[in-house]
Image (tube, rainbow, N blue to C red):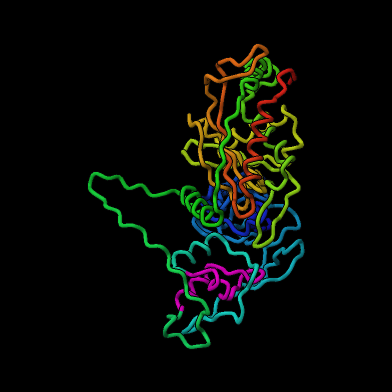
Amino acid sequence: MAIVEMIMPKMGESIMEGTVLSWLKQEGESIEADESVLEVATDKVDTEVPATHGGVLKEILVQEGDVVPVGAPIAKIDTDEEGATEATTAEAVPTPVNGQITDTVEETPAQTDTAVVLEKPAGDRFYSPLVMNIARQESIAMTELELIPGTGRDGRVTKKDILAYVKNRPAAEAAPASTVIPTTPVKAPQPMPVSVSGEDEIIEMDRMRKMIAERMVDSKRISPHVTSFVEADVSGVVSWRNRVKNPFKEREGEPITFTPIFIEAVVKAIKDYPMINIQVDGTRIIKKRAINVGMAVALPSGNLIVPVIHNTDQYNLVGLTKKVNDLARRARENKLTPDDLQGGTYTISNVGSFGNVMGTPIIMQPQVGILALGAVVKKPAVIETPTGDAIAIRHKMFLSHSYDHRVVDGSLGGMFVRRVADYLEKFDTTQSI
């Protein structure tokens, strides 16, 4: 029998490493090709990793909690597949880089009494969430982080690199001139003291809640948020959906909600105002050609996740309905793939599902806008009739548009959300689905 190495797979755009959450199989157990072997967490999603070959799980190379780079070996599988040979030692394992095979040698940071730094900052270098977390905990500013030598692929700073730097980090006031970091580390804000009594319950944040907390704080720090509000009369939309929902469910086997109708209006408005569909990269504005709308989904745990409908403008209303239902179902069943969470260019959040009439949502970085959809409620309203104004019961909802004021001015942000409301109010109630 031959032995093959199972490696950490690439799990989405820009994802360079994953954290091993749990092994679903143990050493000595039989496994089949494509059978789930372990569960891995990235900064995007938790996912199960299938076996690349069938056979017996001979050896587990990484443990639960380990952070493993993409392409690194994670297990050895005994298999009777011909042509498979046991991989060589780690010093000579061929590693795929950009589709080519190169030999890499794992290096460890040099052990010195003082931290070694680069002569000039390493700009445009990727930093993993783990490295960034350590940097925050140790009050290492980005300008200081850019001077730490990296032994990872493409000069990336690994966990070993930053921990070695922290261990030998010089004090700013006593360090030799050759090792002084040219910027003073920014001190992390000190949290307010918390009073805990015997009657209080202490709940440790789970991994996803910690991640959400960090991203929300980062977004508010990066983007100056402004929110514009518009109230829309969606009586026509409500009447049309009430008329078609039962025949649609009988024909398609699934419900039609308001969400795909709202998404369709958002896409039309983005086409009218394409400068909402942008991202910011330093001093550059990246105008996105694809319209990829993310939709926030509440999980049974209470956390939120944002799957993305890629090329949303290519779907008709039936296609949007099916896509929305599929993503929402798989999100609640924890069956989303990393690709389902990648590449969003604009996001909607249905706060109305919680009974809220409006909200001030926080932008999903690096996007510049997010729309909160309030609850649809019946209200008395003045309407125009051929015989004059009259008061009638109408279905109304608030649209709350939060946008990045660095690049989206109030006029654009306000006109965009007004245009979304216009499309909803002018919805074609004679169309069939």
Q: Is residue 398 above or below residue 144?
A: above
Q: Quadrant of residue 416?
A: top right
Residue at 53% from the left image edge and 79% from the top image edge: 182
Horizontal and vertical percent position of residue 366: 62, 53
Q: Quadrant of the N terminus?
A: bottom right
Residue 145 drawn in magenta: yes
Horizontal and vertical percent position of residue 231: 57, 30
Residue 133 makes an appearance in the image: yes
Q: Give the tally of numbered discs.
A: 0
Depth check, front residue: 339 or 414: 414
Depth check, front residue: 406 or 104: 406
Residue 310 drawn in magenta: no
Q: Is residue 352 above or below residue 116?
A: above
Residue 32 makes an appearance in the image: no
Q: Quadrant of the C terminus?
A: top right
Q: Is residue 430 left or right of residue 225?
A: right
Q: Which residues are magenta?
A: 140-169
